[in-house]
Image: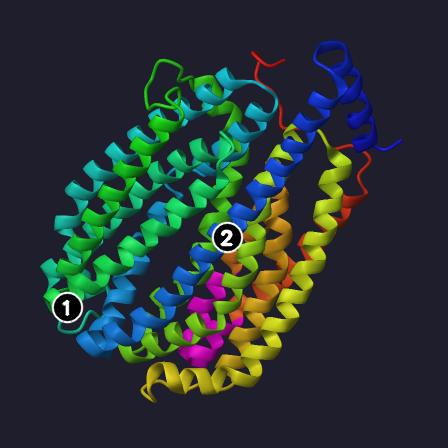
């Protein structure tokens, strides 16, 4: 008898003793329907999220090129890339907290979830204060014009953009913690929906700022105001749905932060490696070639990365269920979901690669109105790079959903550093194509490593959960 058959038999027996077989059977079926409803609603919100992502990628670039020109737009891309480093400032605790809180609630441990929530909140607050003070002290003594080619953009405007976009990224860390609250109470669709709406607000703010003024600092102000507003609304809605999930220090525990620090730090290494692979080429090219070349590389990569939007719909829709099934220790169901997830990922990658190879040049001409052309072999290199990344990321989200991503994260961070060093030395000899080849080799290596990790997970006879705190033990 399988686990699900045993569950039904046990449920019927319990129902007969307490409130009748039929009543309990109906309750059980409602629970299964609610799980399917939760996944389908999360999928719908992921569709909404990815539509916004694609719209942002397709619409913002030509609009900003038209309003600012290619040189100022290239500077905006460069300045936007620098504060991205702040996205790792929480040491990955918000993501690990999201998984941990979901698994704890699945184990009926609400107090443990609150402990994780408030402990991470205190940690984020301290980090934000440290970064704010350090920026205020250091930035006045830094000359951005001497470090980067910022063209006609004023030094004060450039520094304002860095500060405002940096503040925006710090606020986004608190938004991620609020999202952890939505997920753990069984509302992953709200988590995804609000995160997507935050991007929509940022996109609208970008357009309004660019239409209002030619100074890019004005656009950064609009984005910052929009982000603060959306975080405040998200928190108010969460408190209304789950009053116990309020920010505070009463349940905060340094021991809890220490317990989560290892998986959190490794996740930070994954984020940092991802940022290095995404923003590293922009920064390196920005220091060695013209802003126009930076814009050409960025636009070409944006087009080739559209496939990641499609596969992320499936990856992020199923991720909360991995955490929930793992917390409930329904491991056979967990492995079955993993099997179909991998098969779906293979189909998505093959379809993406074929489509973008055949229609990519035509889409580029239509999208950029002939201002930016597909350049070979750069475009082909970018296609293969994204295909490899899509493959291995499908396996990574499974491992990260249950906080078993440590080895994979460290492997990626080491490879990314090697790739970053290779970019630095290749840009002067091989130009844009040489820089693009470095992420390709990194992602191909990660694909091989991830396959080994996933095979091990699928064939393992026992999956041990993340170490429990003393309160749970």
- Which label lies toward us, 1 or 2? 2
Residue for point 35% across, 13% down: 250
- Relative horizontal placement of residue 443, taking residue 229 as reference (left or right): right
Q: Main secondary structure of the magenta part?
A: helix
- Relative horizontal placement of residue 270, taking residue 333 as reference (left or right): left
Q: Which residue is mark 2?
A: 44
Residue for point 27% across, 55% down: 202
Which of the 4 quarters of the picture holds residue 294? bottom left
Q: Which residue is mark 1?
A: 211
Residue for point 72% across, 59% down: 343
In which quadrant of the rendered image does the N terminus lie? top right
* Residue 446 coordinates in the image, percent (x, y): 62, 58
Query: Is 260 located above or below residue 227 in the figure?
Result: above
Density class for disc 2 (Cα within 10 Å; few <14, some 14-19, many ≥20) is some
The boundaries of the magenta stretch are 419-437
Query: Is 427 located above or below residue 82 in the figure?
Result: below
Q: Which SS class for mark 2?
A: helix
Residue at the right extreme, as displayed: 1
């Amino acid at each position: 008898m399988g686990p699900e058959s045993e569950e039904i038999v046990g449920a019927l027996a319990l129902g007969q003793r307490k409130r009748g077989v039929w009543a309990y059977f109906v309750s059980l079926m409602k629970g299964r329907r609610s799980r399917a409803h939760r996944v389908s609603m999360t999928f719908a919100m992921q569709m909404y999220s990815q539509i916004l992502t694609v719209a942002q990628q397709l619409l913002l670039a030509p609009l900003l090129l038209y309003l600012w020109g290619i040189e100022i737009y290239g500077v905006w891309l460069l300045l936007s890339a620098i504060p991205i480093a702040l996205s790792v400032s929480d040491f990955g605790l918000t993501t690990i907290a999201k998984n941990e809180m979901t698994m704890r609630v699945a184990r009926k441990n609400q107090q443990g979830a609150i402990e994780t929530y408030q402990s991470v909140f205190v940690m984020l607050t301290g980090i934000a204060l440290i970064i704010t003070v350090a920026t205020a002290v250091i930035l006045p003594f830094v000359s951005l014009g001497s470090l980067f080619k910022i063209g006609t953009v004023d030094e004060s405007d450039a520094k304002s953009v860095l500060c405002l976009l940096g503040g925006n990224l710090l606020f986004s860390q608190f938004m991620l913690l609020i999202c952890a609250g939505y997920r753990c109470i069984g509302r992953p669709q709200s988590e995804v929906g609000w995160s997507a709406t935050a991007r929509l607000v940022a996109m609208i703010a970008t357009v309004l700022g660019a239409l209002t003024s030619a100074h890019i600092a004005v656009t950064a102000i609009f984005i910052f105001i929009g982000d603060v507003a959306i975080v405040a609304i998200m928190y108010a809605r969460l408190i209304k749905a789950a009053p116990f999930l309020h920010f505070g220090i009463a349940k905060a525990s340094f021991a809890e932060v220490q317990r989560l620090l290892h998986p959190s730090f490794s996740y930070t290494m994954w984020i940092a490696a991802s940022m290095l692979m995404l923003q590293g080429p922009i920064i390196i090219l920005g220091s060695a070639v013209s802003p126009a070349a930076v814009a050409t590389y960025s636009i070409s990569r944006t087009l080739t990365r559209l496939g990641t939007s499609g596969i992320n719909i499936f990856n992020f829709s199923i991720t909360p269920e991995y955490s929930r099934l793992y917390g409930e220790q329904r491991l056979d169901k967990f492995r079955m979901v993993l099997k179909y997830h991998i098969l779906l990922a293979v189909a998505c990658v093959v379809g993406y690669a074929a489509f973008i190879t055949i229609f990519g040049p035509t889409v580029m001409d239509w999208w950029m109105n002939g201002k930016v052309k597909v350049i070979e072999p750069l475009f082909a290199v970018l296609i293969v790079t994204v295909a490899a990344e899509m493959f291995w990321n499908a396996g990574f989200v499974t491992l990260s959903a249950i906080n078993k991503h440590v080895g994979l994260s460290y492997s990626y961070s080491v490879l990314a550093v090697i790739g970053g060093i290779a970019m630095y030395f290749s840009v002067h000899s091989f130009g844009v194509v040489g820089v693009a080849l470095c992420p390709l080799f990194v992602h191909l290596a990660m694909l091989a490593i991830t396959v080994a990790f996933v095979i091990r997970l699928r064939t393992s006879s026992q999956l041990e959960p993340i170490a429990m705190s003393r309160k749970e033990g």
